[in-house]
Image (cartoon, coloured by chain):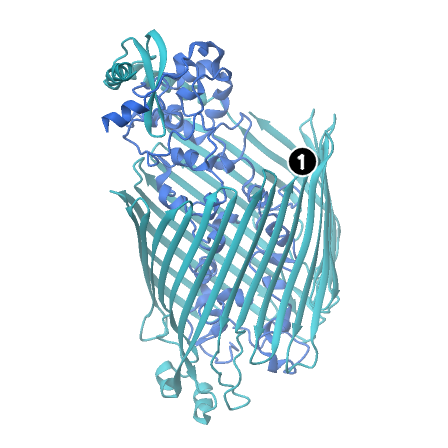
Amino acid sequence: MRIRAAISCVLSWLCLAGTARAAEWIYVYENGVPVGYSVGAGFEFLQVDPADIAQANRALINELTTYGPYRADVGATARLKDSDGSGIRGKGKLPEGFFVHDLAVRGLLTPGDWKEVNGDYFGPDRFYVELDKSGPHWNWDSTTFSRADSLLALAPSGSSTSYVAGARTRYQTDFVWRRGSFEGGAFNIRGRVYERRTRSPLETGDSSLRWVEGSWRTVEHGWGLRGAVSAGAYSATQGGLDDTVLAGRLAANHWLTPSLGVFGDAQMSTTDVVGESTDVIKSSMGGALVWDIAGGMTLSGTARSYSGGGQIAANSHLLGYDDLGARLELHPSTAVDVSASYRRRNASAERLRLEDDAVRALLFADPPATRDDLAPFKTPTSADSDRYDVRAAFHLGRNVLVSASRYVEDFSALPAVGNLTAAQPVDPYFPDLRQQDDLRLAWDMGALGSLTLQSSEYARRNRARESEYRMTRRGASFTGPLTDRLSWRAGATKSERNADLLGTTQDWQGDSWSYDLGLYGRSSLGLYRLNWSSVAPEGRSHSGSTTLGLELRLQRVPVYVSGWWRQWNGGLGGSGSTSDAGVGVGWHFSIR
Amino acid sequence: MVVVVLWCIRIGSPAQDSNEGDEGDALGPSLPWYAESPHWVVGQEFSAVQGAPFIGSTECLYCHPDRKAGYLKTAHARTLIADDTALEQQGCEACHGAGGAHAVLRSRGAIFAFDWQEPMYTSTICLRCHTWLTTREEWRHVPHARGGLKCTTCHDPHVPADHEQRFMLRQNEEQLCLSCHDAVGHEFSRFSSHPVQIEASLSPGPRAIHCTDCHDVHSGQGRGMLAEARVQDLCLRCHMEKGGPFRFVHMATEEGIGEGCLTCHKPHGSDSPWLGVADGRDMCITCHTDREQHNPGVTCWTAGCHSMIHGSNASPLFFK
């Protein structure tokens, strides 16, 4: 046996030499080592000359120019019913007029030049375009969108039940140029430009951003290195901002051994603030030591330090914080994923002693007081917190996933804060106990469908003020087939919000039920979909809505019809509402 | 060492039934061939069979013509014209390894067939080239990887000819995310939400942002796999003016003792305007419990008073 194996090893060596000579054995990598299989005498690998491969590849690419797809929905919509413009619209108004939806064009202009265009057009204020253009080693991606929607605003009368609609528009372009190598190196140039406009009786303002970033990444000798340098300018008419910022960051990771890795990052930004004599510098650095122990168990130690950049802050503000933490993960198989982490935070801040009479005059001086003016009235404060985060996910068999998570952040004590009205320190405003719990069950019942149950609770408690805010959501959804051509989805969620606020004249609560029902099917006519969703508010602090939509896409003719009706009701105990209904007719064209 | 290798060599089943193609699989798939050599990078031999030569995609498509139309529409097809790259980085064999043995044996065991049970094997193949996105070392600690996902869970390298999604995604990006994170999808149907298009056809209107604008699904490490270590930094990418720096800071907007943006906002969606955790003044009095009787009946900022609630350079009470 050993003699035969030794002969096989020699034959293996001959194969490694790149020859196609006849062989009785081939060697397949199994468990990282070559395992020999007998293939009989005269076996030869298929061999193709590299020059022929290149020529064949070019022929394939030339064939590619004949392929699409090119597709879009082109049509027009009309609003059949529309409440007047003074109602609350919440989300964007239904589009009206000519549209192009789900445009997708892709292919090669010339060999080696990949391009792709995706987009929607609903008018000059509502469009979205993605461009992707790339060659073998580089890529250009850009996204541009313009979004106009309505803004809920209170009327100048000051009544809580009198609403007007404001307008908000945003234009934004993001782009990135990447050059990468198969070895892991990459260089990127990213940019972002946005303009934002808000128009309502009591809130009017424009803001803008110009941002560009150069970043790189290399993988060298097991070290993963990333770096970025960025510069930007932004402005806002509200607040009189006209600032410029320079920022840089570095990150590195390395596996010292196959089971012991080290990660680190540092970043800093400096902001030149108009009207201030000094720049604002923020910095952050962190590190982690990761130990893959065995059997899917990983232990990590983490540290982070953050400096908040309070160079111009004149009132109470955060100076920074230091975090130390540990994380234990257990992942013995894809069926089990459990992790527990702990983080200790030491935060430091400066508090302005509002109880000092001299501060009042300084605060309301014109021009406003600077940090230097108010520095003598600052006092250092600190706050420590412990945060526990536990998560678990279990696959029970192949069809059931159960997951649960909880995090608790506990500030044992938060410092008192100054209060202008009381002219003395008062209990802290921040909740000192923050908690979130999530529970989810997903059951794939095969041909019957799939069921999801979930529950979440978000709670914020201020023990010093004996107040609490709590939001819970519990829901269920089911997706499954009705027939082989028709499937359905149904869901219901109960939301509850409760506030128990010491010092207020009334506690409040707001509950709501939300439902959704969908039918999705296909027939000889074509594809159709019917959706209904509703949020039914109960009590205070909730908004309601109802949406009904029908979509039909014919199979034999490239036409689709869709119709929708929706109604929104503003919460706040107010009476504002809006409703609209519309129908759209479009032609779906596609070249594949 | 030589002795160890020799003992590992065994007499296996010959592939005489190779004419049966992929269904008649004499060699495998066997697991886990990759376990001891997980960091397979460009430049090393990239083949399931030792010494097998590269043969080019045309040879592959000769037996797999059904893959042709779909493959040629993918971004991967661009590797066919990368003349300055090695054969191991071109076409079908860039993922499946050298096909010189498979073309003769017609066995799945003689090529990387991506039907391994261990998801990390699949991802390791992809990350030979896509290291600019994430590395194998980073990916194995990402919650998605720990949850058993692999690259091909979301991406389909063999998209059908009529496939229309970018990045070879199996579905529209949002629908793909929500197929697991369906609870989040519900958030986007609430009164106010970020403009992520959940129901593509029944929400007439243009797209704007995507899940991956905030979540780094390939290398995000923390809770939510956010693209920034601090939530505040993430929000300021598109709302830079909200972050100042201001002379008079609303400390709730600072992440540290307060929760930063999450003090007041629910980023996916909310039943309240402005993604608020509550409506109007109710949002403010959850912290400022002593101000419930302060000008009751109006909201705190849209009524024209604390209109610079994120911070101000002129007013300590955020009036202007």
Which is more toward the observer, B248 or A537?
A: A537
Which is more toward the observer, A348 or B140?
A: B140
Which is more toward the observer, B90 or B224?
A: B224
The residue shown at (66%, 53%) is A93
In the image, residue B287 sits, relative to residue B179, either above or below, namely: below
- Judged left or right of residue A248, residue B289 is right
Classify residue A324 by image quadrant.
bottom left
Q: Where is residue A248 in the image (x, y as percent from the top left)?
A: 31, 58
Palette colour of chain A: cyan
Q: Position of residue A534 (x, y in %)?
A: 73, 53
Q: Mark 1 points at which residue?
A: A586
- Judged left or right of residue B215, residue A290 is left
Q: Which chain is blue?
A: B
- Pointer 1 indicates a residue of which chain? A
Q: Where is residue B277 in the image (x, y as percent from the top left)?
A: 60, 65
Name the amino acid, label 1: Gly
Residue B143 shows in this picture: yes
The residue shown at (30%, 10%) is A23
Q: How many other residues sit within 10 Å of disc 1, few (<14), some (14-19) or many (≥20)?
A: many
